[in-house]
Image (tube, rainbow, N blue to C red):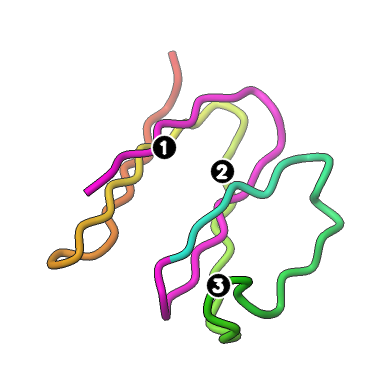
Amino acid sequence: MFVIDLVMQEYRDLVICNNCLWAASLLKDSASVNFQLCPTCGKGDLEIIPVADYESYKMSIDNKRGIEIEFVKDK
């Protein structure tokens, strides 16, 4: 299991492949990138989750439990 902790005050979206659990943050400079296929498994089962400027998220991935994402409003 590993944990990714992201706190930023810029445009970003969370991109997740529902097939292989590949994940990435789509940042402001790369916002024009159009993900159609997962770069890891090649499937088109991608989900884009918007993250507001006042939010942060913590993502945990476990082989048995899958992905758990916790969104928190920054103070």
Tell me the mark number nearer the camera, choosing from 3 and 1: 3
| Left/right of residue 7 with respect to residue 68 in the rendered view | right
In the depicted structure, whether residue 36 falls above or below residue 69: below
Start-end of magenta stretch: 1-21
In the depicted structure, whether residue 26 falls above or below residue 38: above
Amino acid type shown at disc 3: Thr
Mark 3: give few (<14), some (14-19) or many (20+) Cα within 10 Å: few
| Left/right of residue 2 with respect to residue 45 in the rendered view | left
Q: Dot 2: what SS? A: strand
Q: Earlier in the sequence, mark 3 or mark 1?
A: 3
Q: Residue at x 51, y 25 (%)?
A: 7
Q: Residue at x 60, y 75 (%)?
A: 38
Image quarter of residue 67: bottom left
Q: Earlier in the sequence, mark 3 or mark 2?
A: 3
The location of residue 56, given as percent across then percent down, is 46, 31
Q: Which residue is mark 3?
A: 40
Mark 1: give few (<14), some (14-19) or many (20+) Cα within 10 Å: some
C-alpha gap between disc 3 and disc 1:
23 Å
Q: Which residue is mark 1?
A: 57
Tell me the mark number nearer the camera, choosing from 3 and 2: 3
The location of residue 58, given as percent across then percent down, is 35, 38
Residue 51, numbered circle: 2
Residue 53 or 15: which is nearer the viewer?
15
Are dots 2 and 1 in contact, CB under 8 Å? yes
Q: Earlier in the sequence, mark 2 or mark 1?
A: 2
Mark 2: give few (<14), some (14-19) or many (20+) Cα within 10 Å: some
Amino acid type shown at disc 1: Tyr
The location of residue 34, given as percent across then percent down, is 79, 68
In the picture, which quadrant includes the C terminus?
A: top left
